[in-house]
Amino acid sequence: MNTYLKITVASLLFLMFFAVRAFASELFYDPLVVYFKNDYLYKNIENIDIWRLLVHMFYRYFLNSILSLAIIWVLFQRKEYLKFATFFFLIAFVFLIIVFVFLIKNNFETGYLLPFYIRRFIIHPLLLLLLLPAFYYQKLSKE
């Protein structure tokens, strides 16, 4: 794949992240958006449908992971990078969701910052920002 095509496809995939973010309120159930904007300052977390929230968080994480894997494939075209990234995304999701559920069950008694950032790692493609430089460095060191 030539460089211009790689850049174009990768740019389109990055734009799809913006589309997921733009339509998030219509696509996903997330009552914590309002809570983390301002409500955490003066009231406790309200009753939320935890299972529905977890399913929608999984769906959003899955969409972001598929887009991230597509970007990794377009930029590097190496199966071992794709396998590692898939495993990394799976392990990260399991770890993050377990901690997040524990914090929700405790009504964020330890504070709001930890659940805020864990939720952010789940619903945004931040892990891609860790993997891209790592894979690029790996690619440079092999050449």
Image (cartoon, grey):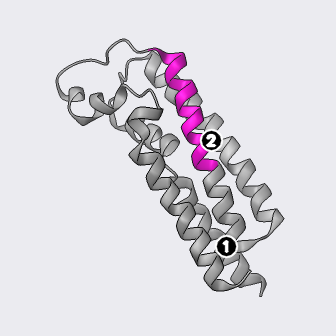
Return the residue nearer the eye: 64 or 15: 15
The three-letter code of the residue at mark 2 reads Phe
Q: In which quadrant of the rendered image does the C terminus lie?
A: bottom right
Q: Is residue 45 left or right of residue 11?
A: left
Q: Which mark is residue 75?
A: 1
Picture residue at 54% right of the left edge, 39% below the top: 60
Residue 114 lies, in percent from the top left, at 40, 37
Residue 36, located in which quarter of the rendered image? top left
Identify the residue at image location x=44%, y=43%.
Answer: 120
Q: What type is the residue that disc 1 sits on?
A: Leu
Q: Label 1 to label 2, Cα distance in Å?
A: 20 Å
Q: Earlier in the sequence, mark 1 or mark 2?
A: 2
Report the side of 140 relative to 49 (left or right): right
Indicate the position of residue 5 as horizontal and vertical percent values: 64, 79
Q: Position of residue 138 (x, y in %)?
A: 71, 75
Magenta range: 49-65
The reply to whether the magenta stretch includes residue 63 is yes
Left or right: where does residue 80 sit relative to residue 96?
right
Determine the residue located farthest toward the left in the rendered image.
42
How many numbered dots are placed on residues in this image?
2
- Mark on residue 62? 2
Callout 1 secondary element: helix
